[in-house]
Image (cartoon, rainbow, N blue to C red):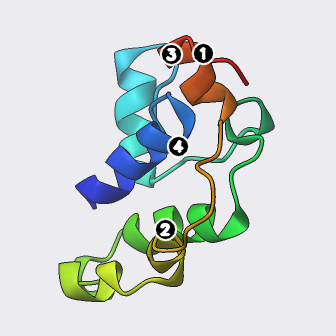
């Protein structure tokens, strides 16, 4: 579950559950209330979002094991020899040129 949260943060630069107050943030966590706002997920593939959803399941029995998660297609795509993308979040935080 926590790897799902970390993956969300790495893809977007923001927390999946953050809200206006601590109470609302806690409710979002308990309800597993998150989304993929275009402002933060522009250029992020549907497979990446599906991977986050795969990990952030509320029922622990339905969550994948680490071994199963590592076999997900989205992670395997990283083994290609394609040029790394310049995601807007990475550009913003690293001061890179697009």
**Sequence-first tag of 3 and 2:** 2
Residue at position x 41%, y 38% in the image: 27
**SS for tag 1?**
helix
Camera-near label (2 vs 4) is: 2
**Sequence-first tag of 1 and 2:** 2
**SS for tag 2?**
loop
Residue at position x 76%, y 29% in the image: 39
**Sequence-first tag of 3 and 4:** 4
84 and 61: which one is in front? 84
Residue 47, x across and y down, in percent: 63, 71
Q: Which residue is mark 4?
A: 11
**Sequence-first tag of 1 and 4:** 4
Camera-near label (1 vs 2) is: 2
Q: In the rendered structure, are the residues bearing label 1 and label 4 in contact, judged by CB atoms less than 8 Å apart?
A: no
Q: In the rendered structure, are the residues bearing label 3 and label 2 in contact, judged by CB atoms less than 8 Å apart?
A: no
Which labelled disc corresponds to residue 61? none
Which labelled disc corresponds to residue 92? 1
Residue at position x 49%, y 68% in the image: 78
Q: CA distance from mark 3 to mark 4?
A: 12 Å
Which labelled disc corresponds to residue 78? 2
Residue 3, x across and y down, in percent: 28, 57
Camera-near label (3 vs 2) is: 2
Q: Which residue is mark 3?
A: 93
**Sequence-first tag of 2 and 4:** 4
Residue 85, x across and y down, in percent: 64, 45
**SS for tag 4?**
helix
Question: How many other residues sit within 10 Å of disc 3, few (<14), some (14-19) or many (≥20)?
Answer: few
Q: In the rendered structure, are the residues bearing label 2 and label 4 in contact, judged by CB atoms less than 8 Å apart?
A: no
State which quarter of the image contains the C terminus. top right
Can residue 2 be seen here? The reply is yes
């Amino acid at each position: 579950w926590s790897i799902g949260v970390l993956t969300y943060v790495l893809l977007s630069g923001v927390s999946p559950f953050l809200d206006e107050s601590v109470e609302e943030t806690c409710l979002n966590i308990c309800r597993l209330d998150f989304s993929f706002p275009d402002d933060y997920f522009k250029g992020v593939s549907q497979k990446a979002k599906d991977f986050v959803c795969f990990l952030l399941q509320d029922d622990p029995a339905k969550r994948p094991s680490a071994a199963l998660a590592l076999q997900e297609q989205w992670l395997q795509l990283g083994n290609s020899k394609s040029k790394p993308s310049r995601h807007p979040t990475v550009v913003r935080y690293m001061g890179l040129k697009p």
